[in-house]
């Protein structure tokens, strides 16, 4: 992976408490999986930043290599990869995601 791409990914992850690598934008997700994660974060009223991987092929492939995770979206909380859509959805449904946000002081509930 190109060093600039790696640094860009690290900056996004480390500069934001909650960061989502996704296809599209939060206002206009371009895949159902990305849309689902955005809906969960929006429902929980958790502030997050995002990177549209469709805008940069280097980032799109680089994030997969960086995380050793083959799919997008990828959600990071306080620098740690939480997972993709299926994992985030399951964590939300069983309350685990809310606990992570509470423990990191990112949720007001």
Image (cartoon, rainbow, N blue to C red):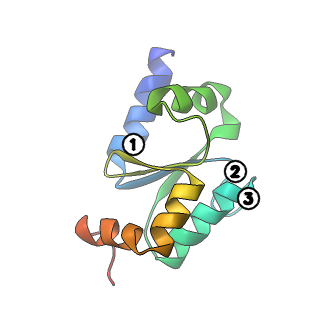
Mark 3 or mark 2: which is in front?
3
Q: What residue is shown at x 53% (from left), y 51% (from top)? A: 50
Q: Secondary structure at mark 2?
A: loop
Residue 28, above or below 71: below
Q: Secondary structure at mark 1?
A: helix
Q: Position of residue 97 (x, y in %)?
A: 40, 67
Which residue is tagged 3? 32
Left or right of residue 51, residue 79 in this image: left
How crowded pointer 1 is (Cα within 10 Å; few <14, some 14-19, many 20+) is rated as many
Q: Position of residue 100 (x, y in %)?
A: 32, 65
Mark 1 or mark 3: which is in front?
3
**Real-space Cα separation, disc 1 to disc 2, in angstroms:** 18 Å
109 or 83, nearer to the observer: 83
Task: Please tell me which of labels 3 and 2 falls first in the chain.
Answer: 2
Task: Please tell me which of labels 1 and 3 falls first in the chain.
Answer: 1
Q: Residue furthest top?
A: 2
Task: Please tell me which of labels 1 and 2 falls first in the chain.
Answer: 1
**To which quarter of the image does residue 96 belong?**
bottom left
**Real-space Cα separation, disc 1 to disc 3, in angstroms:** 23 Å
Q: Secondary structure at mark 3?
A: helix
């Amino acid at each position: 992976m190109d060093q600039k791409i790696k640094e860009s990914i690290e900056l996004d992850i480390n500069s934001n408490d909650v960061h989502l690598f996704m296809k599209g934008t939060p206002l206009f997700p371009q895949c159902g999986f990305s849309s689902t994660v955005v809906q969960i974060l929006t429902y929980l009223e958790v502030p997050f930043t995002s990177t549209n991987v469709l805008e940069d092929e280097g980032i799109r492939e680089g994030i997969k290599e960086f995380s050793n995770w083959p799919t997008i979206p990828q959600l990071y909380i306080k620098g740690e990869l939480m997972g993709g859509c299926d994992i985030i959805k399951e964590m939300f449904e069983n309350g685990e995601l809310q606990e992570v946000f509470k423990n990191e002081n990112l949720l007001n509930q």
